Each structure stands twice: as structure tokens, then as C-alpha cells.
Image (cartoon, grey):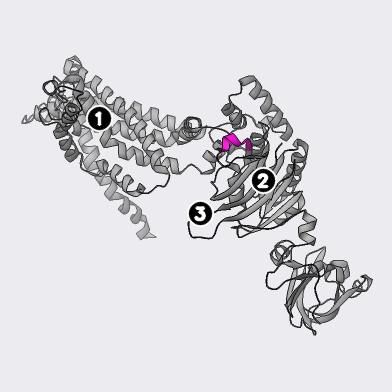
Amino acid sequence: MKGQRWLGPAMIAPAILYIVALVGLPFLMAFVYSVGDVKVGSVGYHFVGLQNFISILKNPTFRLALRNSFIFTISSQILVLIGANILALALKDAFPGRRLLRFLILLPWVAPVSIGSIGWKWILDSLYSVVNWVLVRMHLVKQFDAPVWLGEPKLAMISVIAVHTWHMLPFATVILLAGLTAIPKDIPEAAAVDGAGFFRTLFQITIPMMLPIINVAVLFGAIFTFTDMTVIYILTRGGPYDSTQVIPALAFFTGILGSDLAEGAAISIFMLPLLAVATYMVLRAAHRAEVT
Amino acid sequence: MAVVETRKLTKVFKRGNVGAVNDVDLQSREGEFLVLLGPSGSGKTTLLRMIAGLEEPTSGEILIGGKVVNDLSPRERGIAMVFQSYALYPHLSAYNNIVFPLKAQGMEKERRRKQAEWAASLLGIQHLFARKPRELSGGERQRVALARAIVREPSLFLLDEPLSNLDAKLRASAREELEQFQKRIGTTAIYVTHDQVEAMAMGDRIVVMSQGCVRQIGTPAEVYDQPADTFVATFLGSPPMNILPADGVIVGFRPEHFLPPGVAERLGAHVSYQFHITHGEYLGAERILYGTIEGGALHGRKVISRIPSTHAAGLVDDSVHAFAVAEGDLKFFDPKTEKRTKFGRLPQ
């Protein structure tokens, strides 16, 4: 069949074209830039080897951003995991209003992250913060000594982690809920008859059985968090004093806003081996959980 | 060992609907193998789950060992259950599946090991300890599930169609094994099945259920020979009992009691009918004959006869013969209540 020989390739072509044009090509350009001396507006290209990488490694801001990226990713993922487990357990069984609650919990995910973050920017504002207003009214803090959520290094980090967790939680909840509903009803019932209480059932039966899907949620969440800069860009721009600066934001600030395309590219490329290792580790864990 | 009792036990899933289980009064005996038998939807599994504590009764009481356990959680009831799917923990090895109830009790490691070995040796599965459930065959899974159930020596043993996932050949041997096994450990067992052969073969007593109600409780011989009503009469036995309504009474007799000429004469007092055979099925050892009765009050009623192949000579399709039923084998049912009545007047 002559027509059929072309049908397959023709059908897959748009997908390949999309990946090549929008992922492959920029990726290749980032590689090329990271070993060159390209700046916004420059006309030539000179190969400079690993000089960009050496330069960013010497840069204390970069090292801080790298550390922050890990803190940001790991803390928010831990919080997301714990929160998503609790929510998934709470939403598993039927109760009046469950549909509404599920919808409400999903909202932070479907709402554009920029809108959500702007909302949070107002909630955490130094003057008009509703959080502070509540804390003051509850006499937990003094009116003129209220925490400046986005203005103090530690509080700023806590704030961006909290907002990012708020944003990521629904997605992880949905994934874990799917994993939880996939466990046959008999299994927790058997555990109940066998004499296991809530926590024994949770930690020895339910969570181990959900492990492969938890791994998927963590892999997605970690990679998304490590490469995302929206929340930080809107809330703190990496400040104060770079205390919430993370790698993707730094790449953007350096490469686009700072016009140093080459160094920006080098910072982005730096994430690649880290993400590759993380992906490999989680995939292996997922595979192991499936086999044994 | 414990005796289970239910008093007016009722379960209604959706308010306003008919109950899944209605006013069930039941009492097991010490060390008994009690079978709950009924078609799907008869409420037998719901009843079992209420005894296990997995389903909350709408009303009524459950007593285990003389104590009301309605408000106790499954773990506090001291029971063990084997699920239809076996419900083995897929991420744990057979050994860890078996010791899981012991861990939940807080038993120390050395005693757990001994106890698990004891349970496994009863079922001959020590060599499977290291395997995961998915590496086990259906029969092996069933044994692991049984081992997990007996390992902490429960006072009561609940089984929800544990043989239905096995193939026919394995089922027969597993049935016998399970029965022997229960006799050996002597624990009271409640066994749910929709398979009447299983129920007859294994049960010390059978509880026949339909639409959430208990229709009859009795030994296999009692429920088969003295069915309480037409439902029990037709649910047990294959082919089912002939049920012939006529003249303000329902007459019933088993196909194997509807005997051909030559055999019929040897019966004592008997009733004869002209049996018009429409077609027959040859099943090797026996023949099933379908047809109608000709003449008399039962004219035109469909009946089935089941006779040994050795007595089937000459009983060809589309022939009429004088078949007979011994008077003692005739059952009578009240046409209104469908309950069996002691005596009946034979319609002429």
C-alpha cells in the first residue's frame, strides 16, 4: 500500500516538527551560546570554550542561587507530598460537598500562576498584608513590628516556598488521589480485619502501594519547580539580597534582562546534568517499586 | 472458639429502598462450618461483611461469643477473613503477608516466625515465603490468604467465596482440602458461596438466602430433601425440582425421583403420570429428559426427569411412557405463601 507508507510519518510529523522547532532548536542554541561570547546586539560569535561556566561558578550569586534552588525545590516538594497525601485521603471517601471541595482544591492549579502570585503578593504586602492584619488582631504580633514577608531573607524564602506549594498541591493531590483509588477496596479492608489501625495501614499498606505513582508526582513536581521562576519573579525578583534567587530566574535576569546571552545560556545549561541525574534516580526508583 | 449470633440484623443501603439484609436471625454452633448460600444479590456477602465489621448494620445486633460487637471495629472482633480476591498485599512477600496480622498485634519477631511457620506448614507453603503475590498461582495465593487468616488463631473464620477464582479442577481439590483443614483446626467458619455443590459438600449446615432474607437453615440433607419453600426447592438441585401448580396446591418432586417404567414398579406406594418426552440430554452417567405430563389435573405441565443412563433404554424423543414418583418423594407447597406444607392433597 503506497498511501499507508506515508500515512504514519505524515501523522507523526507535526509532533516532531513541534519538538524540533520549539524545544530542540532553542536547546541547541543554548548549547552554542553557552560556549560563545554572544550578547544581545552583538554581531559576531567567538568560541570561548568553558569560560562562561568557569565565570558563573566563581560568581557568588550563582552559587547562592544554586543552593536556593535546592532549598526551594526540596522543601516545597516535601510540603506538597505531605499535603497531597492528607488531601487525597480526605477526598477519597464520599461525603456531602466532596465535588465542590475537589473543585475548589483544584482551583490554584487551573488559575494562571501569575494571577495567583499577584494575589499572594498583595496578601503578603509589607503594608496591606491581610496575614499581618489577622496576626495583629489576634495579638500575635505588634502592629508596628509585623513581619515583612517578602522583605526579610528567611521570611521571603518561606513565603515563596509556601506560595509555590499552594500552586503545586492540587496537581499532586489529583495524581495521588488516582493512585489511592486504584488500590482495590479489599486491601485496606483486609488490613482492618488483620488488626491494623489507621497509621499502620497508611504507612505499611497504602503508601507503599502508591509508591510508583508518588514517584511520578515527585519527578514532575521537582523538575517543574527546579525550572520554574514565575512565583519568584512576581513575588520577590530573587530578592532581598538574592536570598530567593534561583537558577532559572538568574538565567533570565542575566541572559535577557542583563543582555549577557552567553552567560544566561551557561546558567540554564548548568541545570541539565542535575535534572538528568534526578530524572534517572526517580525513574529507577519507580521501576524498582514496580518490580519488587 | 466462638459462636456467632445475629438478631434481627438488617442493612439498608439507601433509605427507602428494600434492605440488602432483612431481619436475619442466625446462630452458629461451636466449631461449625456454616455456609451462606444464595444467588447474587441475596445479601449473603453483606451479612458476612457486617459480621466482620466492614459494614455497619442499619439495625439489629451481632454477637460473637455471647458479646454484642456492633460497636467494635474489625480489629477488636478477633476474626479472620479470606476475601474473594484474597486481598494479599501486593508489595509484601508471602511471609510478610502472613505475619502482618501478628505485627499488628505487636508480637515479637521470634514468635511471629514460629507462628508463621506453623500456619504455613498446615498448608504446605513454607517454600513460597520469599515470593511476592504476583509470583504465585491462584491456588498458592489462596493458601497464603488462608495462612494469613489462621496465623493468629482467630476465634472465627469468615470466607467470602474463596474458591471462585480457581479453575474447576483446582476448585474441587481445594474444596476438599479447605473442609479438612477447617475440621482439623476446629474453628467456627462462616462461608459464603453461590455454588450449591460447594455448599452441599462443605457445609455442616446451610443458610439459604434470597433477597436479604433467610429462607431456610438446615443440614445439606434437610435443605435438599425438606425444602422450606419453592425458592429453596428450585435453587438447590440441578436440574431444579419440578414445581407443578394445580388445583389450589403446588406439587413438587425432584427430577431424580421421577422414574421410568421398570423402576417405578419397584417403588412402594407411588403416583403414575403419562410423561411425554420432548427431548433428552445425554450427560454420560445420566440422562436428563424434558417433557410434559399428559392427562389428569397436571396435563400439559413441563417436567424434567433425571435418570441413570442404564435405565434409559427406549426413552426416545417424542414418546410417551408411564413415569412414577414414590408418594414419599412428593412435596406440597402452599400456592399463596409458597411455603411447604406437611400434607397435601394430590390433584386428580
* Residues packed near mark 2 inside 10 Å, few (<14), some (14 to 19) or many (20 plus): many
Q: Please report the residue visible at 31 percent of the width from the left and 33 percent of the height from the top.
A: A221
| Chain ID of residue with mark 2 | B
Q: Please report the residue visible at 35 percent of the width from the left and 42 percent of the height from the top.
A: A174
Residue B212 falls in image quadrant = bottom right
Which residue is disc 1 drawn over? A162
Which contiguous range is marked in magenta? Answer: B73-79
Where does the image place residue A170, in percent across and percent down from the top left? Answer: 31, 39
Which residue is disc 3 drawn over? B13
Q: Nearer the observer, disc 3 or disc 1?
A: 3
Q: Find numbered disc 2 in the image and state the secondary structure of the residue it sits on.
A: strand
Q: Is there one chain holding both mark 3 and mark 1?
A: no
Which three-letter amino acid code belongs to the residue tagged 1? Ala
Depth check, front residue: B29 or B233: B29
Where does the image place residue B321, in percent across and percent down from the top left? Answer: 85, 80
Magenta-colored stretch includes residue A91: no
* Residues packed near mark 3 inside 10 Å, few (<14), some (14 to 19) or many (20 plus): some
Which residue is disc 2 drawn over? B5
Q: Is there one chain holding both mark 3 and mark 2?
A: yes
Residue A146 falls in image quadrant = top left
Gap between marks 3 and 2 measured at Cα: 22 Å
Vertical position of residue B168 compared to residue A192: above or below: below
